[in-house]
Amino acid sequence: MKILVVEDDPTTAAYIAEGLRQEGHAVDQLGEGRDGLIRATTGEFDVMVIDRMLPGLDGLSLVKALRATHNRTPVLFLTALGGVDDRIEGLNAGADDYLVKPFAFGELSARLAALARRPQMQAETTALTAGDLTMDLLTRRVTRAGTEIDLLPREFALLEQLLRRKGRVQTRTMLLESVWDIRFDPQTNVVETHISRLRAKIDKPFEHELIKTVRGAGYRIEA
């Protein structure tokens, strides 16, 4: 494998690089965040090991910038920040795995091998469909049977959530979290109201109903 290591502690960086080279891997080793980002975006790597606390550009910012360029190379964060919130923050920034210092080299090697075995991510989806309904995520245009449908922003977000999980039931709680960012029950019928409005636009004018109610569970969209 070709591996990029961005670690500012010389002793730790040398330990990782030497161990990986002894296993037969090609290793590029850098100690500064901005240099790491440039190398990550201009080189071809199988996996990357990135420290969170880097000079110049911290690891979180490095990975966020990397993902913004649609670079999907697997990233393992290596850091002394081992709290649950730290791990969540790292994974949400775009990392694929998280290893806390001090660590065993054998575990680092095994985790990198596991990341490299993961199938490559497919190209980013730009359109969602269900039967004759199409949603263009780039132009934010929705059409059904060739007819353009005008949706309000929240209606668009609700339809997108249903289309991304086509055929699967979305509960009221799941829709509140994903569309409204509400993580408690507000005791309102906001979901039901918006489902009704959405049906009036994408179902009632057409022959076949796409949005289904699953009694006692939630909603799903299917052709």
Image (tube, grey):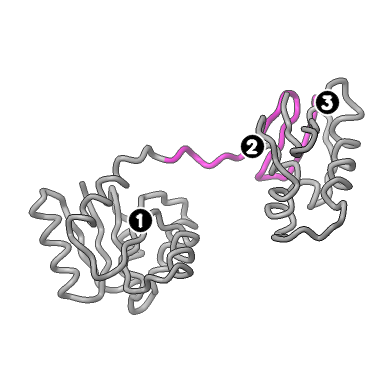
Q: Which residue is mark 3?
A: 209
Q: Residue at x 40, y 66 (%)?
A: 62
Under mark 2, the amino acid is: Arg
Residue 204, image x, y percentages? 91, 29
Q: Which residue is mark 2?
A: 165
Q: Which residue is mark 1?
A: 75
Q: Which label's residue is closer to the chain start, 1 or 2? A: 1
Pointer 1 with pointer 3, Cβ within 8 A: no
In the image, is 60 to the left or to the right of 156?
left
Under mark 1, the amino acid is: Val
Specify the farthest residue to the left.
22
Q: Residue at x 77, y 32 (%)?
A: 214
Specify the farthest residue to the bottom.
55
Q: Residue at x 21, y 53 (%)?
A: 109
Residue 206, image x, y percentages? 88, 24
When the figure is inspected, residue 56 is found, relative to residue 118, above or below; the finding is: below
Q: Which label's residue is closer to the chain start, 1 or 3? A: 1
Under mark 3, the amino acid is: Glu
